[in-house]
Image (cartoon, rainbow, N blue to C red):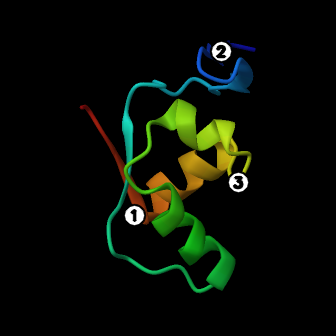
Amino acid sequence: MKTTTNKKNEVKVNLGGLDGSLIYTATGKVARATHNAERHLTLNGMTVTEALATRLVNAQDIKYDLARGFITLEAK
């Protein structure tokens, strides 16, 4: 299990094999579940590490959203 520490808050997050420096970007495709659609907008523009530190999402959620086209992970 690979973990990283957000130096600002000292929060340990499980990256789940994801690159923590990539930017979580909503694509505009809207999820049917309201809470998921709101999460995509809330996390939009954060790095993967920052998004995971919010505890609104875990690595598996990000991988699922990526596979379904709700988000992209882009380099800075």
Give the vertical position of 72 relative to 31 (above or below). above
Q: Position of residue 65 (x, y in %)?
A: 52, 58
Earlier-in-chain disc, 1 versus 3: 3
Q: Quadrant of the C terminus?
A: top left
Which residue is tagged 2? Answer: 5
Give the vertical position of 37 relative to 49 (above or below). below
**Left-right relation of 27 to 2:** left
| Residue type highlighted by circle 1 | Gly
What's the CA distance linking mark 1 and mark 3? 19 Å
Foreground pick, 39 / 66: 39
| Residue type highlighted by circle 3 | Leu
Q: Position of residue 27 (x, y in %)?
A: 32, 66
What's the CA distance linking mark 2 and mark 1? 28 Å
Name the outermost residue toward the front.
Answer: 8
Earlier-in-chain disc, 2 versus 3: 2
> Which label lies toward us, 2 or 1?
2
**Label number found at residue 56:** 3
Q: Position of residue 58 (x, y in %)?
A: 70, 43
Foreground pick, 69 / 27: 27
> Which label lies toward us, 1 or 3?
3
Question: Pointer 2: residues within 10 angstroms few (<14), some, or many (20+)?
Answer: few
- Give the SS element for disc 2: strand
Foreground pick, 61 / 43: 43
Which residue is tagged 1? Answer: 69
